Amino acid sequence: MSDHHKETTLPSSRKKNLKVLFGIGTGNAMEWFDWNIYALFAVFFAPQFFASGSPMSDLLKTFGVFAVGFVARPFGGVLFGLIADRRGRQFSMTVAVGLAAVGSLIIGLTPTHETIGAWAAVVLVTCRMIQGLAHGGELPSANTYISEMAPREKRGLWASLIYFSGTIGIICGAVLAAVLSGILTDAQMSSYGWRIPFVLGGVFGLFALYLRSRLQETEIFESSAKSQKSESQQSKPSLWSQIREHRRLLVRVAAMTVGSTVNYYVWAVATPAYAISVHGVDPSGAMWAGAAANVVFIIMLPVWGTVSDRIGRRPVLIFSGIMMITLLFPLTSIIRGQAWQLFVAMAIALVFMAGTVSIGPAVFSEMFPTRMRAVGIGLPTSLAVAIFGGTTPYLQAFFADKGIPGVFNWYAIVLMAISVATVIFFLPESKGKDLTAAGEVSESLSPSSV
């Protein structure tokens, strides 16, 4: 290759990579922003949609709608996973971010109960279901896309973008909540302030839709689609036959997800509220401690992704999982009544949590054949997140209220132990795997045989 050709090709390749990363990251950040601002602002908009006369009753109904979104996520995982495997990864994740943006925008613009009566609650439930479908669909679509677009020697690093960008979206929502609640009165927040994040989420989500619509489809999917076109219609396996054929891999993905999703929701999401209600930590200090700890989490994600590209996926997953099991009780005991204690505990936990989640998209993509890669990721992960992740804050608060918080800690430890054991006994090393290969990681392979 001539020097002139190198000079023209390398910048072009770098520009393409940046376009891909920015398109995926922006959309993923807005999906997580849209998903989490609902809980952050629920206390302000609950009376606007239900108006029962009891603030607590309105809030409980609003959080009930929040749970509806979690119920919709597995259906989104299957639906958009199927779309991604049939129509393309780029098309699927573009539609997903568009649906999330529309749902957010409609919530932000919907008239209140005082204007349209019970229809306000109907619109809220509908939009939250749409967002649940979209959020469940974002995971298999974006995870598969970024794994197939990444250079095989940097797939772990690229995969870390999913939680990296998602956490940025969560932090932006938290900062916006802090700013708005600081400059607006409670009356103003209840009147119109709560609408601002939903409208912003919708507008920026439509911008992400535009960015994703300009991305190219992955070469791996296009190559697979061409080969499938040459097959006779009768010889093409149905979705359910593929699920039955790879059922063991699906179970492994779910088993690897249960531990990480519970511990992620504990340390990245629920612990500040737990510290406020159980240990009396100052609310403002707890929120800032949580935000600062998540910055540590963001920093560590690409670090672990890079390490996995050097030494392998299995060592990273096993080491970080064992550290979470070992440190859960000691870190919980650190949290007393001070915000700095909360930050220390969360920051240490999230250093190792980053290891368990950063390379998930790469690991799961390396497990499945191209024709069902998105469904293979979306179905088991969305089910595990909905069942175990969605109930984590409630169970943590429930056992604390009963005076037996240690029971929840053992629950989280057992689930993480299941995830680690699955990696040790059933996950072959797949670092640098060629995703274009016709044969994927065999279900009969043991770790030692790779």
Image: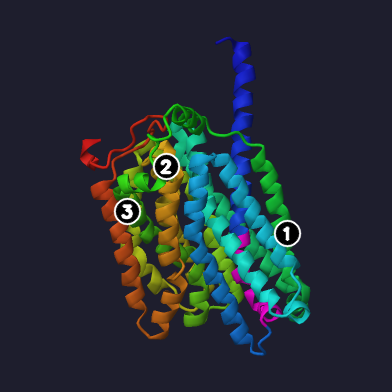
Report whether 356 appears left or right of 342.
left
Residue 35: within the magenta?
yes
**Residue 314 in view here:** yes
Image quadrant assignment for residue 258: bottom left
For the residues labelled 2 and 1, say whether their Cβ atoms are less than 8 Å apart: no
Name the residue carrying label 3.
251
The quadrant of the rendering that contains the C terminus is top left
> What residue lies at 45% left-to-right and 76% top-to-bottom?
394
Secondary structure state at the residue bearing disc 1: helix
Distance from the alpha carbon under mark 3 to that under mark 2: 15 Å
Report whether 218 appears left or right of 40.
left
Farthest residue, direction bottom? 53
Q: Report crowding for label 3: few under 14, some 14 to 19, many 20 or more residues within 10 A (C-alpha).
A: some
Q: How many labels does the image show?
A: 3
Upstream in the sequence, badge 2 or badge 1? 1
Distance from the alpha carbon under mark 2 to that under mark 1: 35 Å
Q: Residue flagged by tag 2: what amino acid is it?
A: Met
Q: Give how far across and how far down residue 268 sits, in percent.
A: 49, 63
Name the residue carrying label 1.
200
Overall secondary structure of the magenta section: helix
Distance from the alpha carbon under mark 3 to that under mark 1: 38 Å
> What residue lies at 57% left-to-right and 50% top-to-bottom?
165
Q: Give how far across and how far down residue 62 sits, in percent.
A: 60, 76
Secondary structure state at the residue bearing disc 2: helix
Q: In this view, does 294 lie above or below 359?
A: below
Foreground label between 2 and 1: 2
Foreground label between 3 and 2: 2
Residue 443: within the magenta?
no
Q: Give how far across and how far down residue 257 sits, in percent.
A: 38, 56
> What residue lies at 63% left-to-right and 25% top-to-bottom?
12
Upstream in the sequence, badge 3 or badge 1? 1
Foreground label between 3 and 1: 3
